[in-house]
Amino acid sequence: MAANLRPGLQNSRVACATSIMLVFVLGAILGAGSMTAVNRFRQKSPPFWTEGGKALSVQKWKRDLNLTPDQTREIEAILDDFTMYYRNVVSDGKTRIMTILNEEQRQKFRRMMEESQPATAAAK
């Protein structure tokens, strides 16, 4: 009689192990898919201090917060001020960095900044 139970027990162990493996595999697939979707969304949404990002942010805030025209204008002015401040901080930071580098390092730093131009162009 014990011999008859053994194949059934083995089948249930295999089924259990298969189910657990399936859960982990599906979890990994869903996790990877979710991260891909989040990264695509982040890449399509420029920061609010960029011109395109400002327009998208103001549009969303206007809709979600039910902003009045006066509030919208004031927020746009604040974002314009922030954009100028951000550009000045970045420019000042680069200038200060250049003063402490030797000539070879400055050339490399300039190349590095040019290579990262897509990221810094979004901030302009």
Image (cartoon, rainbow, N blue to C red):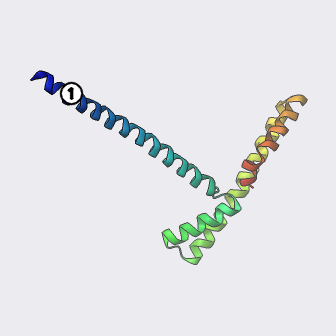
Q: Looking at the image, which residue is at 28% across and 35% down?
A: 15
Q: Residue furthest right?
A: 103
Quadrant containing the N terminus is: top left
Residue 110's x, y, as percent? 84, 39
Give the residue number, with chain letter if any, for mark 1: 7
Mark 1: give few (<14), some (14-19) or many (20+) Cα within 10 Å.
few
Q: Looking at the image, which residue is at 39% across and 37% down?
A: 24
Of the pair 93 and 22, the residue shown nearer to us: 22
Residue 57's x, y, as percent? 59, 63
Residue 44's x, y, as percent? 62, 57
Quadrant containing the C terminus is: bottom right
Q: Looking at the image, which residue is at 62% across and 53% down?
A: 43
Residue 65's x, y, as percent? 49, 69
Q: Residue furthest left?
A: 1
Of the pair 42 and 48, the residue shown nearer to us: 42
Mark 1 secondary-structure assignment: helix
Q: Is residue 44 above or below residue 115?
A: below
Of the pair 118 and 24, the residue shown nearer to us: 24
- Amino acid residing under circle 1: Pro
Residue 79 figure quarter: bottom right
Left or right: where 93 falls relative to 106: left
Of the pair 9 and 80, the residue shown nearer to us: 9
Q: Looking at the image, which residue is at 53% across and 52% down?
A: 37
